[in-house]
Amino acid sequence: MDPLVITLRFVHVVCGALWVGMFVFSSFFLLPAIQEAGPEGGKVMAGIQRRGLMTVMPLLAIGALISGIWLYLRAAGGMPAEYGRSPVGLAYGLGGLAAIVAWILGMTVMRPSMLKSVALGQSLGPTASAEERQRVMGEVQRLRGRAAGSSRLTAGLLLFAVAAMAVARYL
Ligand code: HEM
Protein backbone atom coordinates (compact mmCIF):
# COMPACT_ATOMS: atom_id res chain seq x y z
CA MET A 1 0.00 0.00 0.00
CA ASP A 2 1.20 3.50 -0.88
CA PRO A 3 2.12 5.45 2.34
CA LEU A 4 0.75 8.63 0.73
CA VAL A 5 -2.69 7.06 0.29
CA ILE A 6 -2.66 5.76 3.88
CA THR A 7 -1.75 9.25 5.15
CA LEU A 8 -4.40 10.93 3.00
CA ARG A 9 -7.10 8.47 4.10
CA PHE A 10 -6.04 8.89 7.74
CA VAL A 11 -6.23 12.70 7.56
CA HIS A 12 -9.43 12.53 5.51
CA VAL A 13 -11.43 10.19 7.72
CA VAL A 14 -10.21 11.58 11.07
CA CYS A 15 -10.71 15.26 10.11
CA GLY A 16 -14.02 14.51 8.35
CA ALA A 17 -15.43 12.53 11.29
CA LEU A 18 -14.45 15.21 13.82
CA TRP A 19 -15.73 18.04 11.62
CA VAL A 20 -19.15 16.46 11.03
CA GLY A 21 -19.48 15.21 14.61
CA MET A 22 -18.65 18.57 16.15
CA PHE A 23 -20.84 20.40 13.67
CA VAL A 24 -23.91 18.23 14.18
CA PHE A 25 -23.53 18.45 17.96
CA SER A 26 -23.25 22.27 17.77
CA SER A 27 -26.22 22.67 15.39
CA PHE A 28 -28.75 20.37 16.98
CA PHE A 29 -27.81 20.55 20.68
CA LEU A 30 -25.46 23.38 21.63
CA LEU A 31 -26.76 26.34 19.60
CA PRO A 32 -30.46 25.78 20.41
CA ALA A 33 -29.57 25.46 24.12
CA ILE A 34 -27.52 28.67 24.00
CA GLN A 35 -30.33 30.50 22.24
CA GLU A 36 -32.84 29.31 24.81
CA ALA A 37 -30.60 30.55 27.63
CA GLY A 38 -30.94 34.18 26.41
CA PRO A 39 -28.34 36.65 27.80
CA GLU A 40 -26.70 33.90 29.93
CA GLY A 41 -26.00 31.94 26.75
CA GLY A 42 -23.50 34.64 25.76
CA LYS A 43 -21.08 33.47 28.48
CA VAL A 44 -21.11 29.90 27.14
CA MET A 45 -20.65 31.19 23.59
CA ALA A 46 -17.69 33.38 24.67
CA GLY A 47 -16.11 30.43 26.56
CA ILE A 48 -16.41 28.19 23.51
CA GLN A 49 -14.87 30.86 21.31
CA ARG A 50 -11.96 31.36 23.77
CA ARG A 51 -11.22 27.62 23.48
CA GLY A 52 -10.85 28.05 19.72
CA LEU A 53 -13.86 26.16 18.35
CA MET A 54 -14.25 28.69 15.51
CA THR A 55 -10.63 28.03 14.46
CA VAL A 56 -10.44 24.27 15.10
CA MET A 57 -13.58 23.43 13.08
CA PRO A 58 -12.54 25.26 9.87
CA LEU A 59 -9.05 23.67 10.14
CA LEU A 60 -10.55 20.17 10.46
CA ALA A 61 -12.76 21.00 7.49
CA ILE A 62 -9.78 22.11 5.39
CA GLY A 63 -7.95 18.85 6.30
CA ALA A 64 -10.96 16.79 5.16
CA LEU A 65 -11.51 18.85 1.99
CA ILE A 66 -7.90 18.97 0.73
CA SER A 67 -7.28 15.26 1.39
CA GLY A 68 -10.69 14.40 -0.13
CA ILE A 69 -10.07 16.36 -3.32
CA TRP A 70 -6.58 14.81 -3.55
CA LEU A 71 -8.00 11.27 -3.09
CA TYR A 72 -10.71 12.01 -5.66
CA LEU A 73 -8.22 13.19 -8.30
CA ARG A 74 -6.00 10.19 -7.55
CA ALA A 75 -8.92 7.73 -7.82
CA ALA A 76 -9.97 9.42 -11.08
CA GLY A 77 -6.52 8.62 -12.56
CA GLY A 78 -6.31 11.88 -14.50
CA MET A 79 -9.86 11.61 -15.89
CA PRO A 80 -12.16 13.29 -13.31
CA ALA A 81 -15.01 13.77 -15.81
CA GLU A 82 -15.05 10.05 -16.72
CA TYR A 83 -14.78 9.03 -13.05
CA GLY A 84 -17.67 11.37 -12.17
CA ARG A 85 -19.92 9.43 -14.57
CA SER A 86 -19.36 6.09 -12.80
CA PRO A 87 -21.68 5.37 -9.81
CA VAL A 88 -18.73 5.30 -7.38
CA GLY A 89 -17.19 8.51 -8.71
CA LEU A 90 -20.59 10.22 -8.81
CA ALA A 91 -21.27 9.36 -5.15
CA TYR A 92 -17.84 10.58 -4.00
CA GLY A 93 -18.22 13.65 -6.24
CA LEU A 94 -21.71 14.63 -5.02
CA GLY A 95 -20.76 13.94 -1.40
CA GLY A 96 -17.59 16.00 -1.83
CA LEU A 97 -19.51 18.84 -3.48
CA ALA A 98 -22.01 18.91 -0.60
CA ALA A 99 -19.10 19.12 1.88
CA ILE A 100 -17.50 21.99 -0.08
CA VAL A 101 -20.82 23.94 -0.18
CA ALA A 102 -21.24 23.25 3.56
CA TRP A 103 -17.77 24.70 4.24
CA ILE A 104 -18.49 27.85 2.19
CA LEU A 105 -21.84 28.33 3.97
CA GLY A 106 -20.25 27.80 7.37
CA MET A 107 -17.47 30.30 6.66
CA THR A 108 -19.63 33.00 5.04
CA VAL A 109 -22.81 32.91 7.14
CA MET A 110 -22.53 30.89 10.35
CA ARG A 111 -19.01 31.78 11.54
CA PRO A 112 -19.35 35.58 11.07
CA SER A 113 -22.81 35.59 12.73
CA MET A 114 -21.51 33.72 15.78
CA LEU A 115 -18.36 35.84 16.12
CA LYS A 116 -20.37 39.05 15.76
CA SER A 117 -22.95 37.96 18.34
CA VAL A 118 -20.19 37.18 20.88
CA ALA A 119 -18.46 40.54 20.23
CA LEU A 120 -21.76 42.43 20.53
CA GLY A 121 -22.67 40.67 23.77
CA GLN A 122 -19.25 41.50 25.23
CA SER A 123 -19.51 45.14 24.13
CA LEU A 124 -22.24 45.73 26.73
CA GLY A 125 -20.56 47.30 29.73
CA PRO A 126 -22.05 47.25 33.27
CA THR A 127 -23.07 50.89 32.81
CA ALA A 128 -25.22 50.25 29.71
CA SER A 129 -28.77 51.59 30.02
CA ALA A 130 -31.79 49.25 29.97
CA GLU A 131 -32.78 50.42 26.46
CA GLU A 132 -29.24 49.96 25.17
CA ARG A 133 -29.11 46.48 26.75
CA GLN A 134 -32.44 45.54 25.17
CA ARG A 135 -31.41 46.83 21.74
CA VAL A 136 -28.08 44.99 21.77
CA MET A 137 -29.60 41.75 23.10
CA GLY A 138 -32.25 41.89 20.34
CA GLU A 139 -29.48 42.10 17.75
CA VAL A 140 -27.52 39.30 19.50
CA GLN A 141 -30.60 37.02 19.40
CA ARG A 142 -31.14 37.87 15.70
CA LEU A 143 -27.53 36.92 14.90
CA ARG A 144 -27.80 33.70 16.94
CA GLY A 145 -31.00 32.82 15.08
CA ARG A 146 -29.21 33.40 11.76
CA ALA A 147 -26.28 31.22 12.88
CA ALA A 148 -28.65 28.48 14.09
CA GLY A 149 -30.70 28.51 10.85
CA SER A 150 -27.68 28.37 8.54
CA SER A 151 -26.04 25.73 10.73
CA ARG A 152 -29.01 23.36 10.28
CA LEU A 153 -28.71 23.65 6.50
CA THR A 154 -24.93 23.14 6.71
CA ALA A 155 -25.39 20.11 8.99
CA GLY A 156 -27.86 18.63 6.46
CA LEU A 157 -25.27 19.00 3.67
CA LEU A 158 -22.58 17.41 5.86
CA LEU A 159 -24.83 14.47 6.75
CA PHE A 160 -25.50 13.94 3.05
CA ALA A 161 -21.72 14.03 2.40
CA VAL A 162 -21.01 11.38 5.08
CA ALA A 163 -23.86 9.18 3.82
CA ALA A 164 -22.48 9.36 0.25
CA MET A 165 -18.92 8.59 1.47
CA ALA A 166 -20.22 5.66 3.52
CA VAL A 167 -21.83 3.83 0.57
CA ALA A 168 -19.89 5.10 -2.48
CA ARG A 169 -17.34 2.26 -2.59
CA TYR A 170 -20.08 -0.39 -2.94
CA LEU A 171 -22.11 1.24 -5.74
C1 HEM B 1 -17.88 16.04 5.33
C2 HEM B 1 -16.69 15.78 4.91
C3 HEM B 1 -16.26 14.40 4.55
C4 HEM B 1 -16.34 13.24 5.30
C5 HEM B 1 -16.89 13.07 6.71
C6 HEM B 1 -15.78 12.19 4.49
C7 HEM B 1 -15.67 10.86 4.91
C8 HEM B 1 -15.10 9.87 4.17
C9 HEM B 1 -14.92 8.50 4.61
C10 HEM B 1 -15.35 7.95 5.98
C11 HEM B 1 -14.33 7.81 3.61
C12 HEM B 1 -13.95 6.33 3.60
C13 HEM B 1 -15.02 5.56 2.83
C14 HEM B 1 -14.62 4.09 2.58
O1 HEM B 1 -13.47 3.73 2.76
O2 HEM B 1 -15.49 3.32 2.16
C15 HEM B 1 -14.13 8.75 2.52
C16 HEM B 1 -13.56 8.42 1.32
C17 HEM B 1 -13.40 9.27 0.27
N1 HEM B 1 -13.75 10.62 0.24
FE1 HEM B 1 -14.60 11.66 1.74
N2 HEM B 1 -15.40 12.71 3.28
C18 HEM B 1 -15.68 14.06 3.29
C19 HEM B 1 -15.44 14.97 2.27
C20 HEM B 1 -14.91 14.65 1.02
C21 HEM B 1 -14.62 15.58 -0.03
C22 HEM B 1 -14.82 17.11 0.01
C23 HEM B 1 -14.13 14.88 -1.08
C24 HEM B 1 -13.70 15.43 -2.40
C25 HEM B 1 -14.27 15.13 -3.51
C26 HEM B 1 -14.08 13.48 -0.68
C27 HEM B 1 -13.64 12.41 -1.45
C28 HEM B 1 -13.44 11.13 -1.01
C29 HEM B 1 -12.85 10.06 -1.82
C30 HEM B 1 -12.37 10.17 -3.24
C31 HEM B 1 -12.81 8.92 -1.01
C32 HEM B 1 -12.28 7.52 -1.40
C33 HEM B 1 -10.85 7.43 -0.94
C34 HEM B 1 -10.18 6.17 -1.44
O3 HEM B 1 -10.36 5.13 -0.80
O4 HEM B 1 -9.51 6.26 -2.46
N3 HEM B 1 -14.56 13.39 0.61
N4 HEM B 1 -14.60 9.99 2.88
Image (cartoon, helix red, strand yellow):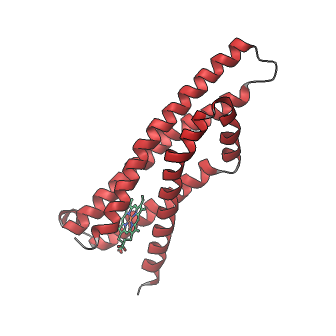
Residue 80 x, y percent position in the rendering? 25, 65
* Res 92 quadrant in image: bottom left
Which residue is nearer to you in this view: 123 or 41? 41
Q: Residue furthest bottom?
A: 1
User: Where in the figure is residue 112, as x and y percent of width and height?
Assistant: 55, 37
Q: Is residue 83 left or right of residue 158?
A: left
- Taking the spot 48% from the left edge, 52% from the top edge, the residue there is 24
Q: Residue furthest right?
A: 127
Q: How many marks?
A: 0
Classify 96 as above or below 130.
below
For ligand 1, the image quadrant comes to: bottom left
Q: Note whether residue 85 is visible.
A: yes
The residue located at (31%, 62%) in the rendering is 164
Q: Position of residue 117 (x, y in %)?
A: 61, 32
Q: Would residue 80 be visible to someone looking at this image?
A: no
The image shows residue 78, relative to residue 126, as above or below, that is below
Q: Tell me residue 146's x, y (percent).
A: 49, 32
